[in-house]
Image: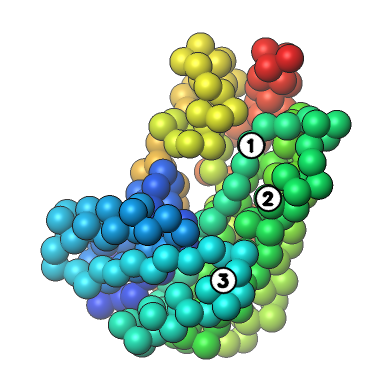
Amino acid sequence: MHASMDYSAKKVVVIGGTSGINLQIALAFAAAGADVAVASRNPEKVSAAVALLQAQHPQGHHLGACFDVRDTAAVAAGFALIRDQFHQIDVLISGAAGNFPARVTELSENGFKSVIDIDLLGSFHVVKQAYPLLTRPSAIIQISAPQAFLPMSMQAHVCAAKAGVDMLTRTLAMEWGTEGIRVNSIVPGPIANTEGFKRLAPSAELQQRVAKSVPLGRNGQCHDIANAALFLASDLASYITGVVLPVDGGWSLGGAGMAMAELAKVSR
């Protein structure tokens, strides 16, 4: 392992780290030697993720916190628990997200607000509570989505929320850069075997259609995103901040819009 990818004794917090992409990120940092805290609002998933981390990487000190990112007091209590155990945070992964396909005419105010509250307001709550615990230097990585800059049918709520997340990333990079806190966004493309991808492309046939729209010719894997996170949080990326990085096999170059248009046709 490259010395810069050695996270021994580092404290890493992964919000939403109990499933899918974020769980793989948590496992990758644990494999690189980090002590990892995962958080989500489902206590069973939190317990299962911590057990998996401990089983696969027993050399580390891993812990879980259960809270809803929409609840300011709950987020504060969760970070108080992390502070008591870890005392500091070297890397923060902010990955809480909500999504479901719906046309604007069928989208309720509550449905729109729910995604905004989880993705955007939740990201704000997380970075605000993490700030006092961040080491100098440290790294924040927000898990965004191509909807942040690519308009997609049935995704108005997610487009609005994730666009806000990426602007929050850029603003934080400016405000906190002089303190040595780097802030970047990773934009996953179509990632196989994740809940979000299954919701948007629920059949094997549809998933294959998406794969054909990716310039590299395949849907991504969770480890593709985890590898990008390991790099962005490392010393190798010490001069990178305020970046919104697509990790999508080139999907955002044009295939994303075509694929989503096809999926919208099928869903009618």
Tell me which amino acid carries mark 1.
Phe
Q: Is residue 90 left or right of residue 149?
A: left
Mark count: 3
Q: Position of residue 239 (x, y in %)?
A: 54, 71
Q: CA distance from mark 1 to mark 2?
A: 9 Å
Out of 155 and 186, give the one closest to the viewer. Answer: 155
Q: Is residue 120 left or right of residue 16?
A: right
Nearer the observer: mark 1 or 3; the answer is 1
Nearer the observer: mark 3 or 2; the answer is 2
Out of 45 and 90, give the one closest to the viewer. Answer: 45
Q: Position of residue 136 (x, y in %)?
A: 47, 86
Asked if 169 appears above or below 84 in the picture, the reply is above
Which corner quadrant of the image does residue 262 belong to?
top right
Element class at badge 1: loop
**Circle 2 residue:** 115
Disc nearer the start of the sequence (1/2) = 1
Instruction: Write the residue at 67% across / 32% down.
Output: 101
Asked if 18 appears above or below 219 in the picture, the reply is below
**Circle 1 residue:** 100
Q: Position of residue 104 (x, y in %)?
A: 83, 35
Q: Are marks 1 and 3 in contact (CB under 8 Å)?
A: no
Disc nearer the start of the sequence (3/2) = 2
Instruction: Write the residue at 50% across / 16% down.
Output: 203
Quadrant placement of the N terminus: bottom left
Asked if 156 appears above or below 129 in the picture, the reply is above
Q: Are marks 1 and 2 in contact (CB under 8 Å)?
A: yes
Name the mark on residue 165.
none
Q: Is residue 139 visible?
A: yes
Instruction: Write the residue at 42% across / 55% down.
Output: 42
Name the mark on residue 126.
3
Q: Is residue 254 visible?
A: no
Element class at badge 3: helix
